[in-house]
Image (cartoon, rainbow, N blue to C red):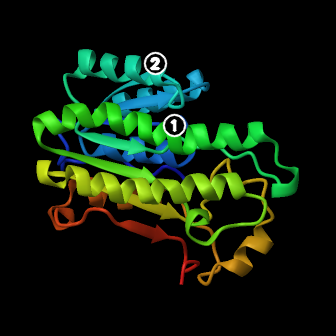
Amino acid sequence: MGNTFKMTQNKILSGKVALVTGASRGIGKSIALSLGALGAEVVVNYSASDTSAEEVAKSINKSGGSSYKLKFDVSDEESVNNGINQIIKNSGKIDILINNAGITRDGLLMRMKESQWDEVLNTNLKGVFLCTKNVSRFMLKQRSGKIINITSIVGLIGNPGQANYAASKAGVIGFTKTCAKEFASRGIKVNAIAPGFIETEMTENLKTDDLLKMIPLGKLGSADQIASLVNFLVSSDASEYITGQTISIDGGMNM
């Protein structure tokens, strides 16, 4: 499935500002497009893919939405501070934070280099910490906000060759629960989504036949399906009593 979201008449997120990290491709791109379709002003964060990020922002703007790209490194405190301050300067607030940026540096544990461990943990876990800490300062003041952390099925069940990735994504789940408890009294909801194997650039080099044997539904998921779940959590009245949860969307793998 491709990116199928279109601008609709129901701009339920009109007036809201959403930051999506790692939004230049894959799941982040689909989430950014879907939030734009619901009327949010979308900040497309990226660290390297300037052209791809520009295309995402342009797509939202051409469809009648509002978006701009913003480069900063989620694993670097100064970079995050500067990025968040720039959003506040440009947009005045942040209502929705989607912590999506993530990388893999796979390898069996006995062969894994310390640099591979550090790089993954710094982006996937420290990045969530830095972005949430900075954005929550403004959400706490306005006494509202939605934070969605993209974790992974691997953080729930593990996966050979991904000790660093599994540890980072499991850490995101614990972090999500703690933030949900800390922020609840200020009306801020914090949840995590744990995708299974999704058709993105990150999975295109994996052996599909082997993956399908692990998935009860027998097929890969799509980035748009993840984006639809994000939409529900940030825009539906039915989600207002949901916080601190990790919702799997994995074809039945985590059963």
Percent position of residue 214, x then y: 69, 79
Residue 238 in the image, given as x and y percentages of width and height: 18, 67
> Circle 2: is it few (<14), some (14-19), or many (20+) Cα within 10 Å?
few
Closer to the chain start, of discs 1 and 2, is 1
Report the front residue among 147 and 75: 75
Q: Nearer the viewer, mark 1 or mark 2?
A: 2
Specify the amino acid type for callout 1: Gly
Locate the N terminus by quadrant. Answer: bottom right
**Which residue is rendered at x = 22% and y = 54% of the image?**
235
Q: CA distance from mark 1 to mark 2?
A: 17 Å
Q: Residue 232, located in which quarter of the rendered image?
A: bottom left
* Left or right for 45, reference 161: left
User: Does dot 2 land on a helix, a strand or a loop?
Assistant: helix
Q: Nearer the viewer, residue 148 or 207?
A: 148
Q: Check contact, mark 1 vs mark 2: CB within 8 A.
A: no
Residue 46, image x and y in percent? Answer: 52, 28
Q: Amino acid at mark 2?
A: Glu
The residue nearer to you, when weighing 33 against 196, is 196
| Residue 108 appears in the picture as rendered | no
**Residue named by callout 2:** 78
Q: Residue furthest right?
A: 111
Which label sits on residue 22? Answer: 1
Q: Residue at x 33, y 30 (%)?
A: 134
Residue 160 falls in image quadrant = bottom right
What residue appears at the point 51 percent right and 39 percent down from the top-left corner?
126
Rendered view: 225 above or below 131: below
